[in-house]
Image (cartoon, rainbow, N blue to C red):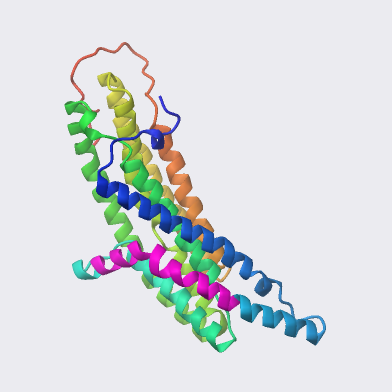
Amino acid sequence: MAKSFFAQNRALTPEELVDRRRTLVRLGLAWLAMMQVMMFALPGYLRIEAGPNDSLDVLDWAIFMMNWASLAMTVPVMLYSAWPIWQGLVQAIQKRQITMDVPVAISMVAAFVPSTISTIAGTGEVYFDSVTMFIAFLLTARFFENRAVQSVDVANLQQGLHQRLQQLCMPILARADRVATVFVLAQLALSLVVTIVWWQLQPEHALSVLVALLVMSCPCALSLAAPVSLAATHATLAAHPQITPEQAAILFSNTRRITYQNLYGALAWHLLTMPLAAFGLVTPWIAALAMFISSVAVMANAWRLYRIPNTTGPTTNTQDYSAPAGLV
């Protein structure tokens, strides 16, 4: 048995292969730009008011040049790497739905546009490092999700197992979608209210707080909770076609439990970290890092499903794959 459910492979269609290559190119560009932009942002973090005026003049000139270099590196990330996000935003608008791409797109625009204006004007804060970091981390999380979903050939699963797993998936995915939708709407409203308050009290910090709130509100971990757990279960069934009915029932029960752990654990993480961002205690790049950590935690927890459950009693190799009562 492979050490990770990501190691399971099925034959991909030509369209899927092309899409994977494009995804890897977008991901590689985002990570390369992120590392470069973070280096370009270093002079801005080092600037202090103390010291000789000529030293500050030199540092300010370096910051000005690095901001332009950061802008040049961020533009292709915004236009090419983030292209799937813009497509998702257009689809959400056409369907009049609130999806994960809505707060993601708003946060990118809220950080990129003012940063571009500040760069051209030669004054003000820039958040190019936060933008590139956010996009790189988000694309990484989505790549893992897509990789997990594509890792298993459901055609090779036993028919009874596949049907039972489909019955398990539907209510779980529906609940995950409802939770994510309510969360996104609530966080967008909260971000607007908090930003207005900061604009009245300390307008110079309002934009930074808004970007941090929007990045922190990205429901990436929420969106990963159900698909990754279900993909791990699919992979386990595919790797062990002779799984017993008792083991299958335990696996399905564990899938439901771990999926809800991921779902409500990610929700609790957001609820605990959002006040920190609202009070200005979290910078945008820290918010992006927190978003990525929560996504990794969800995937690591789902990985626990990729094993055969232990049974305490004797098992029989029958074809009854029904799950315990109350599973769905």
Give the vertical position of 317 relative to 145 (above or below). Answer: above
Give the vertical position of 24 relative to 304 (above or below). Answer: below
Tell whether position 76 is magenta.
yes
Q: Quadrant of residue 280?
A: bottom right
Residue 157 drawn at (x, y percent): 23, 28
Tell me the quadrant of the picture where the N terminus can be found. Answer: top left
Residue 234 drawn at (x, y percent): 30, 34
The residue at 57%/74% (across/down) is: 69
Q: Which residue is the extreme one toward the bottom?
A: 121
Query: In this view of the protein, which residue sits in the foreground, 314 or 50?
Result: 50
Dominant SS type (magenta)? helix
The residue at 28%/41% (across/down) is: 12
Query: In this view of the protein, which residue sits in the foreground, 200 or 50?
Result: 50
- Visible residue check, residue 307: yes
Query: In this view of the protein, which residue sits in the foreground, 184 or 284?
Result: 284
Q: Quadrant of residue 46?
A: bottom right
Tell me the quadrant of the picture where the C terminus can be found. Answer: top left
Q: Quadrant of residue 254?
A: top left
**Which stretch appears magenta?**
67-92
Tell whether position 307 is magenta.
no
- Visible residue check, residue 187: no
